[in-house]
Image (cartoon, grey):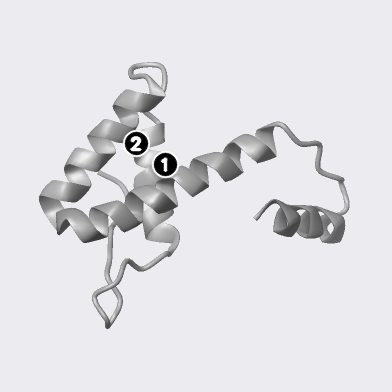
Amino acid sequence: MDGDVALDGNGQLRLDAELLRRFDYYLSLSGEFSPAEIRRLLEGDLREQHGNAIADAALDTFDRYIGLRQALENSSLPDDPAARLAALRELQ
């Protein structure tokens, strides 16, 4: 399984590239499973390995990540990298 769910020094979910890799691992199951089924698979994994508090935080982040990906798919970003970065910041 790709990616990792890590905690910071305070025991809180660390938002990093490894967490996104874990999300993308589950999203690669699209076509085999519905979006709701993918979320349930991720949820089961998170709750089993990390407990409810971390799972809830990760699922909230996953939902926001999905929203951002959908917004990007539905937007027309400019070709200029600086303008693209500004547009992405507005989406957050």
Q: Which residue has dot 1 on it? A: 24
- In the picture, measured across the screen, residue 47 lies left or right of residue 40, that is left
SS of the residue at dot 1?
helix
68 on left or right of 44: right
Spot the residue most to the bottom: 9
Image coordinates for residue 45, horizontal then vertical, percent: 18, 43
Which x, y percent locates residue 59?
A: 35, 48
Residue furthest left in the image: 48
The residue located at (84%, 61%) in the rendering is: 82
Q: In the rendered picture of this protein, how many numbered marks are placed on residues?
A: 2
User: Where in the figure is residue 73, as x and y percent of width and height?
Assistant: 67, 33
Quadrant of the image for the N terminus?
Answer: top left
Which quadrant: the C terminus?
Answer: bottom right
For this view, does 75 lie left or right of residue 27?
Answer: right
Instruction: Using the image, determine if residue 84 lies above or below residue 77.
Output: below
- Indicate whether 22 appears above or below 11: above
Give the quadrant of residue 50. bottom left
Residue that label 2 marks: 26
Q: Quadrant of residue 29?
A: top left
> Residue 64: x percent and y percent?
50, 48
Mark 1: which amino acid?
Asp
Which residue is at a point 41% across and 34% down the rendered structure image? 27
Q: Amino acid at mark 2?
A: Tyr
Disc 2, disc 1: CB below 8 Å? yes
Query: What residue is at 27 percent from the left and 82 percent from the top?
Result: 9
Q: Residues within 10 Å of mark 1 (few under 14, many from 20)?
A: some
Secondary structure found at label 2:
helix
Q: Residue at x 34, y 54 (%)?
A: 58
Which class describes the residues within 10 Å of circle 2: few (<14), some (14-19), or many (20+)?
A: some
Q: For this rendering, which residue is in front, 7 or 82?
A: 7
